[in-house]
Amino acid sequence: MVEDAAYPNSSLFAALDDVTAAPVLGAYLDHFAADPGVRAVKNRSLDLLAAASPATVLDLGCGAGHDLTPLASLVGPAGHVFGVDANAGMLALARTRLAPSTPVTLVRAHSHCLPFANASIAAVRCERLLLHDAQPHRTVVEMARAVVPKGRVVLTEPDWGGLALHHPDQSVTDRLLTGFTARNFATPQAGRMLPSLLRSAGLTPVLIEIQPQICDYDLIDMMVEFRDCAFWGEQQGLLSRGQSESWLSMLRSARDKGVFTCALPHFIAVGIKPS
Ligand SMILES: C[S@@+](CC[C@H](N)C(=O)[O-])C[C@H]1O[C@@H](n2cnc3c(N)ncnc32)[C@H](O)[C@@H]1O
């Protein structure tokens, strides 16, 4: 039997009509946003937007709204921020976290069909949406349509294909993690695709960076749920029950010895719309 998880499966971020999961997804995002590696990615994406001094910013896939207040500070009192998400539950949660006078408008929309006129937004930011999107090129085309000429699009995505988790049985571990990413993400390698997605949407990629997120045991267990991975391995015939328990206990042993090692790369890319 798989133990009840304290956090949801990542695949729930693609269940856009499920409003009931918003509180638990919000708690997951809170935990994630508190991680130093993720904070560094967020701060870098904000700096890259600030460099262009945009008057209007769209945060696409704003989730629980972690970046909306910093974006409002960035655009200043004369500017405006649009937080867009397809999940009404996430927008309701974001609304409760915004101070009343913050210049932010929350909009429910799917990323493939944004309710903004052509060339009407000065800059667009999008963090960790594309990995949940089976057609990420459609989302980037929409961003490119909405942004003004010379405007910038700042994208950040992890690349789950680049997850490095050390385990004495590396070959089984790689198979279990590949299974996890396939079950949970529509586009697990969104990170490495960013420059080509920008270029195909008619934007000029001007910057690509990688920021490593060093994950401790608890953080990566929240994301991948080791017990679920082991159970899936049993179901697939990759592991016997005993081997599955042994796989889990080796991870815990590495944690207890202080040698648990795991890193997830986050890609950051900037595209500029030609004038
Ligand atoms: C992993 S969360 C990231 C939230 C936020 N960007 C952050 O960094 O905390 C992904 C968010 O994108 C939203 N989302 C996923 N696919 C979407 C789509 N195609 N259109 C609009 N929103 C989408 C989900 O509802 C969720 O709130």
Image (tube, rainbow, N blue to C red):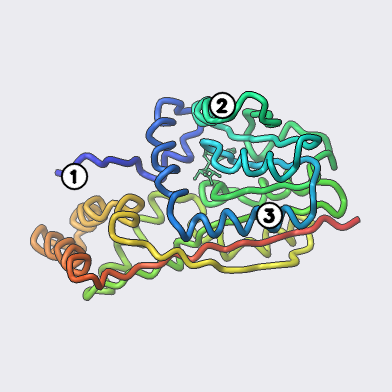
Task: Kindly identify the amino acid type of the residue bearing the numbered disc 1.
Answer: Val
Q: Residues within 10 Å of mark 3 (few under 14, many from 20)?
A: many
- Between the residue at mark 1 and the residue at mark 2, the CA separation in whole angstroms equals 34 Å
Question: For this rendering, which residue is in front, 218 or 162?
Answer: 218
Q: Is residue 174 above or below residue 13?
A: below
The disc placed on residue 154 is: 3
Task: Kindly identify the amino acid type of the residue bearing the numbered disc 2.
Answer: Arg
Position of residue 98 in the picture relative to residue 150 (left or right):
left
The residue positioned 40% from the left and 67% from the top of the image is: 263
Task: Specify the quadrant that holds the N terminus.
Answer: top left
Dot 1 falls on a residue whose secondary structure is loop
Image position, residue 179 (x, y; %): 34, 58
Dot 3 falls on a residue whose secondary structure is strand
Labels 1, 2: front one: 2
The residue positioned 57% from the left and 54% from the top of the image is: 42
Q: Are marks 3 and 2 in contact (CB under 8 Å)?
A: no
Labels 3, 2: front one: 2
Specify the quadrant of the image occupied by residue 117. top right
Mark closest to the chain's N terminus, 1 or 3: 1
Image position, residue 265 (x, y; %): 49, 66
Task: Kindly identify the amino acid type of the residue bearing the numbered disc 3.
Answer: Val
Q: Is residue 239 above or below residue 6?
A: below
Mark closest to the chain's N terminus, 1 or 2: 1
Farthest residue, direction right: 275
User: Pointer 2: what residue?
Assistant: 95
The residue positioned 61% from the left and 61% from the top of the image is: 268
User: Pointer 1: what residue?
Assistant: 2
